[in-house]
């Protein structure tokens, strides 16, 4: 099929809900992918953060191959050794407790919200979330997402959600009360523009939640599984939440989500209270186990620190060259470059030159590179970025 033929079939047969590039990807490996016309792209945003080990990591591929020949799917009427092993990994790397498995970030958050309302007394139902958050597209996760562009056309939303500004403890202090079941946030907002929560703020949130008998939920769908240089983003902060949600990098491209809860909170998800037919599908679980084992055995958390320092240095060098770069921020391999001009033309210019980046909130270039990216690939990527920024600058000068 030619690229044109594929695009035409999309137009005829697929809902138009994604702003897709007119590119058909046929193969990907590490931090590189190739389209149907043989063009190669370097990718600083592989799989929207899912491919943390890079595309088609050999150990993940092998784990999936082996599992596919053994047991692709069995329902949750039964137990599997794979599910037990993955839960043990999360239990040991996280804060102990219990794990519920699903298939995506939205579902992991949906479960967290249900869990918070189940665990707390019935008078408690309100969930406080943050402006510029992103928690997914199912109804409760979408309602938790405090961005009106995500709600548009889907009203009425789920009742009980209260929005406050991010990193503003006084706002939470005013909003929290006897009806609050949980405060939910990303320790680093991804979609919202790579906004890092202050440590003091997180400590104060923990205290407020304890004082008010409500739960603290961290959505670590983007920050989790090693992205920030620790297994989970909260481990940088000294604050332990009651619930952590994971997806994206958990299966390194295989769709799996997890809701990790403290022992007491998790125990309230009793028989029949929640379920997912595909949750902890053995194929995806095998991918997730391989992902965690690879990160551990190949010391990739240390590599995150090294590559992060290298990338931040490169990004700051760009900042000293281009006056329209206002700030470089983030943690580990979650990097935001805030511009004073729209980022979309820069993403387009980069793509034309063979580099894929992401722009969020119109002006923030967001990079979620793979742990396995090489310094040569980073050098090449930043050379292309430099060219794309130069193109933007020359447009500024001529306009
Ligand atoms: C922080 C966060 N939570 C939840 C989600 C939703 O995950 P999914 O698209 O797998 O439902 C995303 C997706 O970008 C996310 O970044």
Image (cartoon, rainbow, N blue to C red):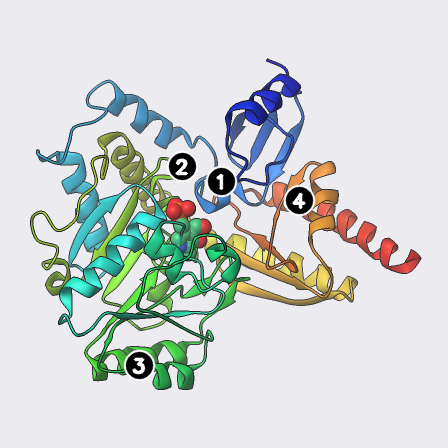
Expressed as whole percent of the image width and height from the top left, the position of residue 222 reads: 42, 53
Query: What residue is disc 3 on?
Result: 176
How many residues crowd mark 3 within 10 Å: few (<14), some (14–19), many (20+)? Answer: many
Expressed as whole percent of the image width and height from the top left, the position of residue 70 reads: 20, 20
Q: Quick check: 149 left or right of 69?
A: right
Q: Is residue 396 above or below residue 13?
A: below
Query: What residue is disc 1 on?
Result: 47
Name the mark nearer the viewer: 4 or 3.
Answer: 3
Mark 1–mark 2 CB contact (< 8 Å) = yes
- Between the C-alphas of marks 3 and 1, the distance is 36 Å
Query: What residue is disc 4 on?
Result: 381
Query: What residue is disc 2 on?
Result: 253
* Residue drawn where x is 31% and y is 22% of the image: 65
Quadrant of the snapshot with the N terminus: top right
Dot 3: element: loop
Is residue 74 among what the camera can see?
yes
Q: Quadrant of residue 199?
A: bottom left
């Amino acid at each position: 099929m030619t690229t044109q033929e594929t695009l035409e079939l999309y137009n005829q047969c697929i809902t138009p809900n994604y702003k897709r590039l007119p590119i058909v990807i046929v193969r990907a490996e590490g931090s590189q992918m190739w389209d149907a016309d043989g063009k190669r792209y370097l990718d600083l945003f592989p799989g929207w953060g899912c491919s943390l080990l890079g595309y088609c990591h050999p150990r993940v591929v092998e784990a999936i191959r082996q599992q596919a020949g053994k047991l692709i799917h069995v329902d949750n009427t039964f137990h599997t050794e794979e599910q037990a092993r993955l839960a043990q990994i999360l239990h040991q790397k996280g804060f102990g407790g219990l794990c519920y498995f699903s298939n995506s970030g939205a579902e992991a958050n949906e479960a967290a919200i249900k869990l918070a309302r189940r665990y707390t007394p019935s008078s408690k139902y309100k969930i406080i979330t943050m402006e510029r958050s992103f928690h997914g597209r199912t109804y409760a996760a979408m309602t938790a997402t405090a961005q009106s562009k995500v709600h548009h056309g889907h009203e009425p939303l789920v009742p009980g959600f209260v929005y406050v500004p991010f990193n503003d403890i006084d706002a939470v202090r005013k909003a929290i009360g006897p009806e609050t079941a949980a405060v939910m946030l990303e320790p680093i907002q991804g979609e919202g523009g790579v906004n890092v929560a202050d440590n003091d703020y997180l400590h104060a949130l923990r205290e407020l939640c304890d004082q008010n008998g409500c739960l603290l939920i961290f959505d670590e769908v983007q920050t989790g599984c090693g992205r920030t240089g620790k297994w989970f983003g909260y481990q940088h902060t000294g604050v332990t939440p009651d619930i952590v949600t994971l997806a994206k990098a958990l299966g390194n491209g295989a769709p799996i989500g997890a809701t990790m809860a403290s022992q007491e909170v998790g125990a309230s998800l009793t028989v029949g209270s929640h379920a997912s037919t595909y949750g902890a599908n053995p194929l995806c679980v095998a991918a997730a186990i391989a992902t965690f084992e690879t990160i551990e055995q190949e010391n990739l958390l240390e590599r995150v620190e090294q590559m992060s320092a290298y990338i931040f240095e490169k990004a700051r060098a760009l900042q000293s060259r281009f006056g329209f770069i206002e700030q470089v921020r983030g943690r580990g391999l979650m990097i935001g470059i805030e511009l004073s001009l729209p980022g979309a033309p820069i993403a387009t210019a980069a793509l034309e030159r063979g580099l894929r980046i992401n722009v969020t909130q119109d002006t923030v270039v967001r990079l979620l590179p793979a742990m396995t990216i090489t310094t040569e690939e980073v050098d090449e990527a930043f050379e292309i970025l430099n060219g794309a920024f130069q193109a933007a600058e020359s447009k500024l000068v001529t306009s």
